[in-house]
Image (spheres, rainbow, N blue to C red):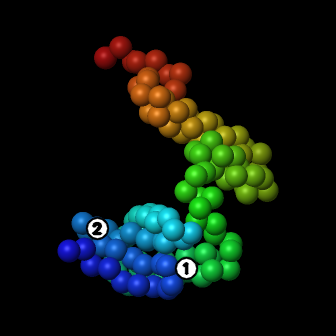
């Protein structure tokens, strides 16, 4: 049985395998996200911070569950608009590649490398 700890009303953490996951019950829907850690105390700290964000309304769990990769990338770019022009250009290049990779995987086509061609090896 997986270890589970209640953090706040509707928010808990669950150990699945070796890592901890955040579990949120909101409006009759369960959403589970990895916390990316094996450390129980770090997972609790992260979950408490996220529970506070959910309670205060700064993190909309239902919107986050339905956010597309393309929309998330767009929001990320807008949040980094104050970065240097060169940094923004490099970030755009990498995020465009990532978005293309995700689109290819979702469609089940391509090799996930965007427009790059095989090296011929």
Residue 98 location, x and y as percent?
54, 39
**Distance Cα–Cα, label 2 vs label 1:** 20 Å
Secondary structure beneath label 1:
helix
Q: Residue furthest top?
A: 120
Identify which residue is drawn at 55% across, 79% down.
51
Indicate left or right for 61 with 31 as reference. right
Q: Is residue 19 visible?
A: yes
When asked about the image quadrant of residue 62, the answer is bottom right
Identify which residue is drawn at 39% across, 69% down.
21
Residue 28 location, x and y as percent?
51, 68
Tally the marks: 2
Q: Please tell me which of labels 2 and 1 falls first in the chain.
A: 2
Tell me if mark 1 has few (under 14), some (14-19) or many (20+) residues whose alpha carbon lies within 10 angstroms of its own. Answer: many
Looking at the picture, tell me which residue is in the foreground, 119 or 109.
109
Looking at the picture, tell me which residue is in the foreground, 30 or 44.
30
Identify which residue is drawn at 53% across, 22% down.
115
| 72 relative to 8, above or below | above
Q: Which residue is mark 1?
A: 51
Q: Which residue is mark 2?
A: 16
Identify which residue is drawn at 55% across, 57% down.
65
When asked about the image quadrant of residue 1, the answer is bottom left
């Amino acid at each position: 049985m997986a270890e589970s700890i209640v953090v706040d009303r509707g928010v808990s953490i669950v150990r699945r395998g070796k890592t901890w996951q955040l579990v949120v019950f909101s409006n009759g829907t369960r959403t589970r996200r990895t916390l990316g850690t094996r450390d129980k105390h770090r997972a609790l700290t992260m979950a408490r911070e996220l529970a506070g964000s959910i309670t205060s309304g700064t993190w909309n769990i239902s919107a986050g569950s339905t956010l597309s990769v393309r929309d998330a990338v767009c929001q990320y770019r807008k949040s980094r608009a104050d970065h240097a022009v060169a940094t923004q250009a490099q970030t755009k290049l990498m995020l465009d590649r990532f978005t293309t990779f995700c689109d290819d995987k979702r469609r089940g086509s391509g090799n996930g490398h965007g427009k790059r061609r095989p090296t011929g090896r």
